[in-house]
Image: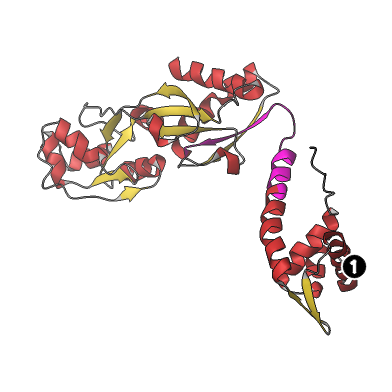
Amino acid sequence: MKSKSVRLPPMQALNAFAAAARHGGFSQAGEEIGLTQSAVNRQIAQLEAMLGTPLFDRIGRRVRLNEAGRAYAEELVPALDRIRRATARAAARPTHRALRVATLPSFGMRWLAPRLPQLTARHPDLIVDFAARSEPFDFAHENFDSAVHFGVRLDWPGVEMDFLFREEAVPVCAPDWLAAHPLRTPADLLDVPLLSQSSRRDAWPRWLSAAGVDVSGLRPGPAFEHFLMLAQASAAGAGVALIPSFLIQPELEAGTLVIPFARPLSSERAYYLVYPPGALSGPLALFRDWMVEQARG
């Protein structure tokens, strides 16, 4: 048996009710949505007539949300919020060739940004907006088409991933600092400030252990949220930092950072391009192919 369709209330009446439910009155609701108090009253009366039940108790000039109104608001307000977010996402697409990509801050600045002219040359009508994000998120609730992730595949369930590359972290410091603090063996690092990236505090213990150093006496040093902050602190003479080499090529080439020990630290974690299942088509497919080609080249 075919179910009977239910006509949706007018959007203006729903907005008036949601505003009145938030503010607990018609006057403030009218100020929020640009209607007079009497106009809000008429919109809600129209909604109540359509639903066949009052949503507010009217006591003289005062109104108060009743039980039916509270139950309706609990379902309606989140639904209106989802409609607004969906509308904002749709309006943010200036063309069918636009993408929004979340990237790790240092990766975006040092690996992605220098390569963007090549992407523009290949796909001049492809618009890609980048935003900094450091943690996995739910694509269903965020306005992103894709993201760059560092970790292992299990870190971000429910998405598709393309492997980009692994990194090698190297110890670096300022040349003047190294001249004033000679480092002859890796064990000498136990006596100097060791700078870390805040989400990878295990990097120094792993590097030292791989170099045969007993880390039982290791003292934790300052930590920085982003690798480029870490690189600047090390270049300023704050101590020795462990940084992925691909992120500090300009500093190494300019000589503002030097490598005291040529012992890179590898990891099972890697960089991946991630996106929702079944989303790989159109502009995203073009961007994905370019990213994979750049990473493997």
Image vertical order of residue 121 relative to residue 64, above or below: above
For the residue pair 154 and 262, the one nearer the viewer reads as 154
Residue farthest to the bottom, as pictured: 60
Rendered-image quadrant of the N terminus: top right
Query: Residue 236 placed where, x, y %?
Result: 33, 45
| Residue that appears at 82% across and 44% down | 4
Query: Residue 156 placed where, x, y %?
Result: 44, 35
Rendered-image quadrant of the C terminus: top left
For the residue pair 17 and 199, the one nearer the viewer reads as 17
Q: What element carries label 1?
A: helix
The quarter of the displayed image where residue 71 is located: bottom right
| Residue that appears at 60% across and 20% down | 285
Residue 130 among those drawn in magenta = no
Query: Residue 76 placed where, x, y %?
Result: 71, 57
Circle 1: residue type? Arg
Image vertical order of residue 225 relative to residue 254, above or below: below
The quarter of the displayed image where residue 39 is located: bottom right
Residue interval drawn in magenta: 83-104
Image vertical order of residue 94 relative to residue 8, above or below: above
Query: Residue 291 placed where, x, y %?
Result: 52, 21
Residue tagged 1: 42
Residue farthest to the front, as pictured: 1
| Residue that appears at 68% across and 47% down | 85
Residue 103 among those drawn in magenta = yes
The quarter of the displayed image where residue 118 is located: top right
For the residue pair 33 and 131, the one nearer the viewer reads as 33
- As drawn, is 165 to the left or to the right of 22? left
